[in-house]
Image (spheres, rainbow, N blue to C red):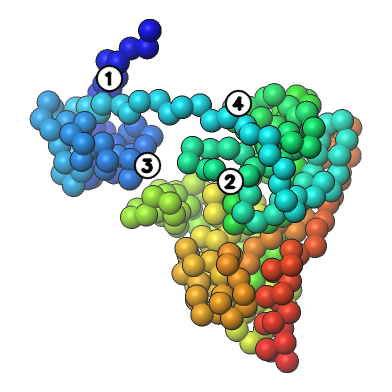
Amino acid sequence: MVSTVPEIRSLPVPDGLEGERVDAAIARMFGFSRTKAAELAAAGKVSIDGSAAGKSERVHGGAWLEVEMPAAAAPVRIVAEPVEGMEIVHDDEDIVVVLKPVGVAAHPSPGWTGTTVIGGLAAAGYRISTSGAAERQGIVHRLDVGTSGLMVVAKSERAYTLLKAQFRDRVVDKRYHALVQGHPDPLSGTIDAPIGRHPNHDYKWAVVADGKPSVTHYDLIEAFRSASLLAIKLETGRTHQIRVHMSAHRHPCVGDLTYGADPTLAKRLGLTRQWLHAKQLGFEHPSDGRWVEFSSEYPADLQHALDVIRADSE
């Protein structure tokens, strides 16, 4: 029989969080998103030293912050479902390299009802590594739903372990192409700025002082009248890293309305997503350590936008 008694967790507020809002403190101390922390406070499930606390109250070092934990989410299942437009670029006994189309998630997650790379591979009869969480078996890295490009998925347990280590140790060569607004100065350079959760928007990320170290290298490929095509190499792999760094650099990816892109330009180019593509992927093959590299062409929507902006610049 499943217990219906709510789980209560209490922690003393560290001195370093002195003066923080309750929702911010909960997010930092208990690992919730800022939005979820605010919801818990609004529902009366948060107290400070035994007294109910609202989300905007301030905490003090040494006080006891008590939270009624939300019920565990239902487990996420992998649904075997064909993915239109997903291409198999390479396949052997250890790995499968796929070209992920836009609008497809890497793996299932709460609230996502669309197709996934994992589900597409399952529908095609691929057997992949059982390592990792149940809903993301074989996944060693991810691409945003709104970003197309190359992904490698582990088929064997050996491949999963070795590929995860390569991503962790930054051995993998990940190269993207991005069409950004304006002309970066300098035209080639490095953005070294920490990234963390956006302080005001739960679904966004931002350059923040207490974020994780994040490094993006970029080089100009081609300049247009109103935009620049860049080759981008990631040294780290934070969520939305390229999008956040380019936006913070005042040159958001064309079409990336979440991070401040011009909607008029996106409409003129026929874009319904950010112009960002995982173009190349290189790593040591887990079977024998040889270096392998894969490359891909632009999807039709990105190529069309590029053709239009190139013609406008002539």
Residue 114: numbered disc: 2
Residue 6: numbered disc: 1
Q: Amino acid at mark 4?
A: Ala
Q: Is residue 93 left or right of residue 49?
A: right
Q: Nearer the viewer, mark 2 or mark 1?
A: 2
- Discs 4, 1 touching: Cβ within 8 Å: no
Q: Amino acid at mark 3?
A: Ser
Residue 201 visible in the picture: yes
Q: Amino acid at mark 2?
A: Gly
Q: Name the N-terminal-most of marks 3 and 1.
A: 1
The residue depicted at 69 percent of the width and 60 percent of the height is 277
- Discs 2, 3 touching: Cβ within 8 Å: no
Q: Is residue 278 above or below residue 25?
A: below
Q: Secondary structure at mark 4?
A: helix
Q: Nearer the viewer, mark 2 or mark 3?
A: 2
Q: Name the N-terminal-most of marks 2 and 3.
A: 3
- Residue 232 location in percent, x, y? 68, 62
- Residue 117 location in percent, x, y? 68, 42
The residue depicted at 63 percent of the width and 34 percent of the height is 79
Q: Secondary structure at mark 3?
A: loop
Q: Is residue 309 above or below residue 35?
A: below
